[in-house]
Amino acid sequence: MIKKKKREALTVTRLINEVLVNQLSISLRQIVNDTSFEKYTGSKRPDLLISEFEFDGENEEQYINNLVAYAEVKDECSIDDSDWKDAIKQGKIKSKKLNLPFFIVTNCKTSIFYNRETGKEITLNKNPIREFQTIDILRLIKNKLKKQPTLNNIQTNVDSISTISEAIFNKKLWELANIYRGINFKDNQEKIDFTIGFISLEFFEEKTQIENKKDETEIYWSDCDDKKSEKVVANLSKYINRLESETQFSEFKKLMESVRVSITGEGGKKSLVEKEDVKKIYDIINSMRPLHGCGFDLFGAVYEMFASSKEKKEFGEYFTRRHYAHILAKLLLKDEKYFNRDKKFKILDLACGTGGFLTESYKILINHYESTKTYDKNAKKFLEKDCFYGIDVREDNISRTKLNMFLVGDGHTNMFPYNTLRHNFKDQEFDYIITNPPYGNGTIKAETPNISTTRTEIAFLCKIIKLLKIGGKACMITPDGVLENPTYSLFRKELLEKCNINAIVSLPKFAFAPYTKEKTYAFFFTKRSSKITKIQKESIWMYIIDNDGLANSDKRFPTKLRNNRNGWLHDEISGWVSTDGEEMQGLLEERWLKYDDSSTNGTEWIDEKGIKRKLRKGAFILANKIIRDKYITLLPEYYLRPYEPKYISIKELDSEIKKINSALDELKTK
């Protein structure tokens, strides 16, 4: 018994340090383990508590009154065994005494959230929860259940929330990487395809469950589990065969077949993956559940883990980080709140890569329609068949986009492997275009009379204008040259004559690191005409993002630090949940098309090094001011943070020259 207690204490310590502190960024002093609070729970000690406040041994009332989570920990039990059921019983009793409307039961591998009032499992956006969650989600669950005690599904629209965090997902990928060391994959691409294929098998079941289409007579992912490794292999093979025979999965047959051949062998050959390893891989991926509604790009995370530097660089050419894809799509589609069967629209990404912009657009529209209660069978059909269009020159990218769209809901019908700049779209026009096209020298001349260039970013921008309907809106990620290069000044004038430029948002230098460190901007505009007309009169809103929640360096690790427990300290993009459990917009969305700090001559913030900064961030720049500029510059920094040269006196110049000469003399004598 003593040994068991010691082992359990060690396991809980690892759970606290590795998961709650390191992965979920909850302060260690906000977590209390196996401590008596007799005033509240008598002799019954709660195993694990998390509060808004740090516990110092003296502030018991403040700590308990601001709890956001309580968990019963049973180290070696299995879900629904006698120990687990006893933990549920204890959870109901103690959570009531702690005035919490929910409790968690965990064996340090799987964690399930229960509603104290109903005793039923809590889901998040209809997805079961199997891991500890960020403090945002804990706040949200507490707040929703305080208002509706019998609620079992927590619905949320907060951008930063996902059912499984990227940090936890990456931890699972590390576990897979350890197994893969003993598997002789021919190259990294085979390893990546195997991983994505295996994860997709789990995803397919989740999708079926969400759509209420599960047929209990058929085999699914969850039916493949077994204590015997050979049985897991046989079940997975049967499951894959079923999926391959069904029309809706037929497009992904190649991906699934690569998994089946790897685990069973082919033509009498030995399998690539030993049955014992198949069982381990299955268990790891099963512990990731649920993956539907995850707030990050699965493909990106898998590539980050398993691709070589060269492959990552190639992948980076068609990969847009999820939190940028989400907020930019949300801002572009902000007016599409209601589904109107008489006012349908088309969204195009003409360099879709893995489909990040399209999948985020799909999720945003679903959220909008559900919030306004206009999501019906007609809206579903519209999103699945008619709304989304994706084009990419690489066929493997189109396959990835189709799978990503399929997994997020559907909408993968209109995805095509075309060369956007060469393809004849005939009379096709689009209401929205959102894209992050390739940059650099190309071979196809841009369709503009004002400059002669084969720069791909210019050629894509011209194509976007051509494909937009009059009144259509676009968001394009563009490098700084388009906005400031003096040789493009006439082209920028053309933009102002054909379009209304609504907003230009400066992204941090490392927004797409380590793939590229080129300075980039989100360029929002509305098409007014296909021909040259009068120059735009409306002011252009410009904004500079200094912090996006990731370190401003090649490493791009998260810096999700709190500002007095409310909001992010270094993230202007993500939404968050207040200490009162209220869902809040991220700073960029909150400030969109209205923030102007000219009257205060700047905005204060604390940078990731803890240094207080005050610089201009947002303003409306008059169109006349832009036109009067010699080169018609469109850079936000040019207007908000103009370069001011530092002048020195002749005496200071002489002093600097003497220092340089002295240093040169020292080098000569060495």
Image (spheres, rainbow, N blue to C red):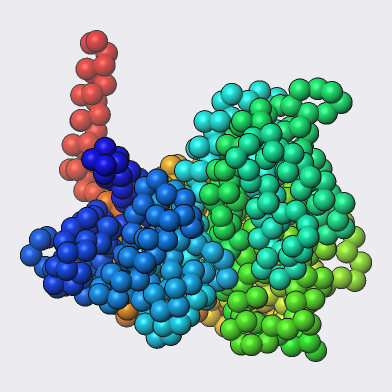
Q: Residue at x 62, y 81 (%)?
A: 370
The structure residue drawn at horizontal position 71% and vertical position 71%, both measured from the top left corner, is 212
Q: Which one is in front, 493 or 119? A: 119
Query: Is 37 above or below relative to 620?
Result: above
Q: Nearer the viewer, residue 101 or 58?
A: 101
Question: In this orientation, does residue 584 appear?
Answer: no
Q: Position of residue 374 (x, y in %)?
A: 68, 87
Q: Nearer the viewer, residue 35 or 86?
A: 86
Residue 287: x percent and y percent? 53, 49
Q: Position of residue 558 (x, y in %)?
A: 40, 51
Is residue 275 visible in this depiction of the protein?
yes
- 524 lies left or right of 653: right
Instruction: Report whether 293 appears left or right of 544.
Output: right
Location of residue 196 (image quadrant): top right
Q: Is residue 202 above or below residue 100?
A: above
- Compared across the picture, whether 176 is left or right of 467 comes to left
Q: Is residue 454 above or below residue 343?
A: above
Tell whether 542 sits left or right of 204.
Answer: left
Quarter containing the N terminus = top left
